[in-house]
Amino acid sequence: MSDDGATRATGAEEGADLRRAGPDRADALPLQSPGARRRGRRGGWARLLGLWSLLILLILAILLGIAALALIDRRLTLPDFVTDRIEARVNAGLAGPEVAIGRIEVYVDRGGVPRVALRDAILRDAGGAQLADLSEIGATLSGRALLSGDVQLRRLRIAGAHATLRRTADGQFLLSLGGGGQSFNGLGPLLDGVDAAFAQPLLAALDRISATDLAVTLEDARTARVWQISGDMQVRRGAEGLTITLEAALFNGTDDAAEAGLVVLTSAASGAAQIAARVDDVPARDIALQSPALAFLEVLDAPISARFRTDIGEDAATDAFHGALTIGAGALRPTAGAEPVPFDSAYTAFDFDPARDRLTLQDLSVTSQMAAFTATGHADLGETGADGWPAALVAQLSLGPARARIDEIFGQPVAFAGGAADLRVRRAPFSVEIGQLVLRDDAGRDLRARGRITAQDDGWEAAIDATAAAMPVERVTALWPVPLASKTRQWLTERITAGTVEDVDAAVRLSPGGTRRMALDFGFRDAAVRYMPDMPPLTGGAGYVTIAEDRFTLVLDEGEVAPETGGVVQMGGSVMVIPDMREKPALGEFTLTPEGDLTAMLEILDRKPIDLFKSGPPPDLGHGRVAAEVAFSTRMKKGVRPEEVTWQAQGEITGFTSDTLVDGRRIEAPRATLSADRQMVSVAGAGTLEGVPLDIRWQRAVEGNTAGASTVTGQVELSADSASRLGIALPQGLIRGRGTGQIRVDLAKDTAPSLRLTSDLAGVGLGLDALGWAKSPGAAGALSVEATLGATPSVERLEVSGGGLRATGGVTLRPGGGLEAARFDRVVIGDWLDAPVTLQGRGAGVPPAIAVRGGRFDLRAAPFGDSNGGGARGGSSQNDGGRGPVDLALDRAQITGGIALTQVRGRIAEGQALSGVLDGRLNGGVPVRATLAGAAGGVSVRVESPDAGGAVRDAGFLQNLRGGRLDLMLNPAGAPGSFDGTLKVTDTRLVNAPTAAEIISAISVVGLIEQLEGQGIVFDEVTAEFRLSPDRLTLYRSSAVGASLGISLDGVYDLASKRLNMQGVVSPIYLINRIGSVLTRRGEGLLGVNFKVYGPASGPGVSVNPLSLFTPGMFREIFRRPAPQRPETMTQ
């Protein structure tokens, strides 16, 4: 191997740099405790190197013989017996130690330089302890020495050496190369051994030793730690002395490797030495183990890059060493149970004087996201134990600019211009005693603190006392740690916005597990306090604050509040207490003693959290001067709900006046009482209302459905005039006469007053002319009105009963007066109307239009007059114009007892008579049209339908008629619900009629039965005259005629029992047979058969007289009873 391949340029350059830098360079620290270098005691190191020299001499003797062979670049492995003889000769010369050689190789390189290599050599001492285990030893001989007949080494190369360096519990070092070892105390003896080796004649020409693939295990019995070093080393000898360089990777039992370097310079002239070392990215705890001066780094969990330098004098004593530590991101972690304190980086440059055990800090800086500071000063190691390691450190520091940005501690950045600190730091347990800490701000104000901080196994423990003479309140809150009574701190930060704090005394105690205790008291003056976030601020505040254990107290000696609405309220004597700051959220108890203008005080109480008037009227309910006491409690949190606030207020008002308690009316009282709590606010006192003496009580609900509303109650005259003055909008003519009622007026902020009026209507008449209804003054009844009294009054709810009427609805007026609409959700009048009704105003003097949307109507009992006029029942009309037009959208209109229209749509013309057109479905079936017209004694109805069969079926008369056109006319018959009617049906068919089939079968008309069971028997025309009453249908005469058949029918149908008693004549082949009908009834021919139908309509009996077939039509009356006769009262 060439010399260049075994040389590390980096180490050489570093050694040259260090030698040029001289003894004043301060960028390194020792890797060991200071030790004495003893030159006179060579010990085992000299003997070890002597063994190597003897071994090499024997090899060189062989090498001289081989050189003559000129075996250029050819390696010759000596035979085993030669190797054994050489091994024996060497061991004989060692006189105690012995060597075991695996094999020996010799060769001459291309430069003609003879070389020898020993493979797998093991060196043992006299006791058999292994001293070295070397994979390969290579040597280069000095050609000049060989020419002179001497054997000297010029280069020595070692590859794959394994060594173990042990530090015993007493600080001694034991170096073992592969097995056994040689002990030494410090670096001095080791350098002595190197010097002794180079003094041997064999090594006189040696200028370089290279060791590659060097593996060193560092075992520290004192700390039970093991490190692995893997790298290359060079030893160079020059005229000035030795230069030893080491470049290696350092492993500490993890997957991460640190870089390490060492340069040692010795002086050939004086024997002194300089040592420079560097390590990069080594855990702080590993660095702390290397020197007592670095012991306090053990509390850091961070990587460190270090630079050390020290000198060893001629007397082998270690001088002061210098160092620089660059600490990466990590944390202060003294114990596993104490919460780590993180930082981003730190740096220190220092000198250490071993004689005084003093660290002089030229520069100390720490930077983190939470804080940053710089300092200079010194620290003395103390309380050194038997092992030579210190247990304490006493530091005196001068602090430079410092900042703290720990949101969880201070909530905002905190800065100081400088300060000083006297500290004692102990290692076990880790603690910091603060003898004095002075922090000075930019204004020259000092914050002083003293105390102790200790890291216990289960967490941090601290006791800190701080004082300050005077500072702005914002400075106090900025320095208040957030974790200590955080909600109270937040309250002070947000609520005391200006002022000066004086005589501050604070004490903080922190126990493991996070238990915190705090005591604080200070005075304040010229303060601006927003004691509640939504209340007006207090200015000119003076008083004091105390915090004892978990109780917070603020006492206000003086201060005033000036709301935006004007006026001033003095608040001196008010107190705020938080009984237990540990609660989350804490409970705040306030006792306010406002004295001053009533309006201003109400403005204060109308703010949250009290919110006196909620959504009610403005707080200027009156004027006067008040002296009150307000006690309330609330949780100290955002978004407090009203139900979470408990409060009450009591006060006395003098010179009270109000135009707002009763809107538009003046109240005066020389003295009044104000009471308020969560449920009610009231003002009570003896005074006058518009000059009338009275005891008045105005009250307003604070909670519940009526929260924010105030009320005034009393008795009022009930008449059309009083209702108009009160702004109660009622239909014209509704109230007639005078009576009394109970009134309640509800007042709410920014809304029109609402009124409720109730009366039993004693002595009061009522009338709704549009519906033809009236109640006499003597009739029982009830009235309930809920109205809004605004610029345009309205009645939201009007309930009227009496005289057969029940109505519920509301009334609105047009701007400027006049009925807009009276909308009744339900109007029940007697037994003829049950429907929602709207009366739509059409202007002064014009009867309102009526709209009926849904409900039912019974034409039989309607009270409307006939075509000649008529009037409303139960009273007289005050409107000669009659009724307005009616738009109908009824669910059901009852025409007769069995005939009704559903889904009725139509319009009835205005006037007193009932006339109009209605469209609907007959009993819910086929569509029909009903035309109403006024008639003597009531209303006549004409019903038309394009489906006569469906109509008579849906009317319940006949189920077997199909098709045809219906024209039904009903006229009032005098008695209620009775009508005389006529019926005409054209082009219809009779199908599947069992009764008719039985009759036809009796007369044996061929083909009619088949026709009846098929498409039916066609009738060209069906007519009837009848009377329809609530309990029966009397058929005076009827006929059905067609080409195949003619039928006449009369009799009675009992609607209640559903039974028939009918008779008639069937005339077959009516097209021919009707030739003789001039002598008979319509529907009867010359030949016909009499029949009877009787019994239940669902299955009537049928009887037929066959003999009547042979009786001419004119004589047929012999075989049947007379037809029913019209009553004499019937109009002919």
Image (cartoon, grey):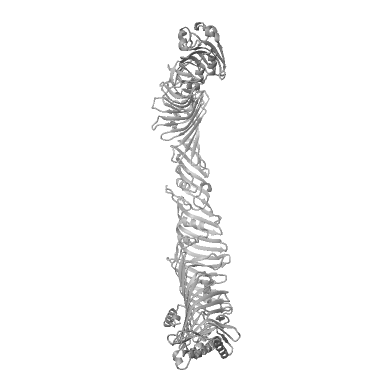
User: For this rendering, which residue is in front, 662 or 1034?
Assistant: 1034
Whether residue 1030 sits left or right of residue 732 in the image: it is right
Q: Is residue 1028 visible?
A: no
Q: Is residue 850 above or below residue 419?
A: above
Q: Is residue 1057 above or below residue 316?
A: above
Q: Is residue 73 above or below residue 528?
A: below
Q: Residue at x 51, y 58 (%)?
A: 486
| Badge count | 0
Q: Is residue 53 visible?
A: yes
User: For this rendering, which residue is in front, 1073 or 475?
Assistant: 1073
- The x and y percentages for residue 1125 are 51, 10
Q: Residue furthest right?
A: 127
- The x and y percentages for residue 1022 are 46, 15
Q: Quadrant of residue 337?
A: bottom right
User: For this rendering, which residue is in front, 336 or 40?
Assistant: 40
Q: Is residue 645 above or below residue 741?
A: below
- The x and y percentages for residue 257 are 50, 72
Q: Quadrant of residue 907?
A: top left
Q: Residue furthest bottom?
A: 148
- The x and y percentages for residue 458 are 58, 65
